[in-house]
Amino acid sequence: MAASAEEYIAHHLTNLTYGQLPDGSWGFAQTAEEVAGMGFWSLNVDSMGWAIGLGLVFAFLFRRAAVIATSGVPGGLQNFVEMIIEFIEETTDSVFQHKNDLIAPLALTIFVWVFLMNLMDLVPVDWIPTLASVLGAPYFKIVPTTDPNITMSMALTVFALIIYYSIKCKGGIGFLKELMFHPFPPFMFPINFVLEGVTLIAKPLSLGLRLFGNMYAGEMIFILIALMFGAGVGFFIFGGVLQWVWAVFHILVISLQAFIFAVLTVVYLAQAHDVDEH
């Protein structure tokens, strides 16, 4: 039973990966060993597919709301979209005190896109992987934010914006001064540089790893609860109750993680724009 449980958990935590196989050809990995052996030049096709697909769903829904928008009595979709936009706009205005028309749309995109990706964690863990296996796919994960490649790629994109606006708003010299002469006196610039460098690098890590860690833990709990369904009638009922309770609580988790990612992005970009101390 232990081996079976370990295989079940490992299967549900393995991505559908495309890369170079041991014989030198390229294709989809059929075992966990082949996945590990593919190395850096491999693609988690399921994570990328779901991330892109959910991004298109977001674009379609908000585009649809814009097309059908009316000054009269709004429909349900328009009300919902306007509520989200107003919420993000108010949150951004309270944090970001500078003039930049990119920040609010960026925060909106991050919040909704991350929320949709997190929302896939509420789909029962066996449904889509089982369907995928019937269609011939050995593995298939459906929650992109449980893949560090997805969360860190988003975090590194935000990090690139942080560097860009830091240099644009403060100038290259000003940005270097911030790294070398803050917060201690100038003669302690080596210590300043180390401290500020760690702080700077910690920003994308805090974004990407926090989201990944929370969503990965949530997925693991769903998988562990699913194991109870094969342990007898009593455990089946108990597992069903636990799964329902965790799913209800997890709605808060997936919403909060999307909100935190969006707000931290705005906070970090606000810091990049802040030139008062220079």
Image (tube, rainbow, N blue to C red):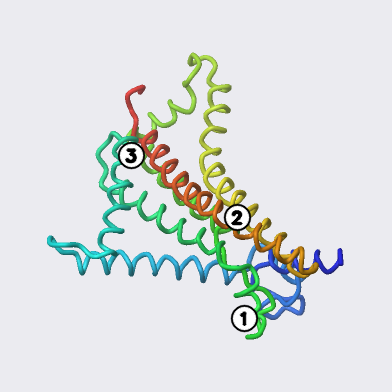
Position of 179 with respect to 171 (left or right) is right
Q: Amino acid at mark 1?
A: Leu
Query: Which residue carries the number 3 mark?
Result: 168
Query: Which residue carries the number 1 mark?
Result: 131
Image vertical order of residue 54 relative to residue 269, above or below = below
Query: Which callout, 3 or 2, points at the residue further toward the start of the chain?
Result: 3
Q: Secondary structure at mark 3?
A: helix
Q: CA distance from mark 3 to mark 2?
A: 48 Å
Q: Amino acid at mark 2?
A: Val
Task: List the single residue furthest toward the left.
Answer: 72
Position of 198 with respect to 174 (left or right) is right
Q: Are marks 2 and 1 in contact (CB under 8 Å)?
A: no
Q: Secondary structure at mark 2?
A: helix
Query: Which callout, 2 or 1, points at the residue further toward the start of the chain?
Result: 1
Q: CA distance from mark 1 to mark 3?
A: 50 Å
Residue at horizontal 23 percent and vertical 65 percent from the top: 75
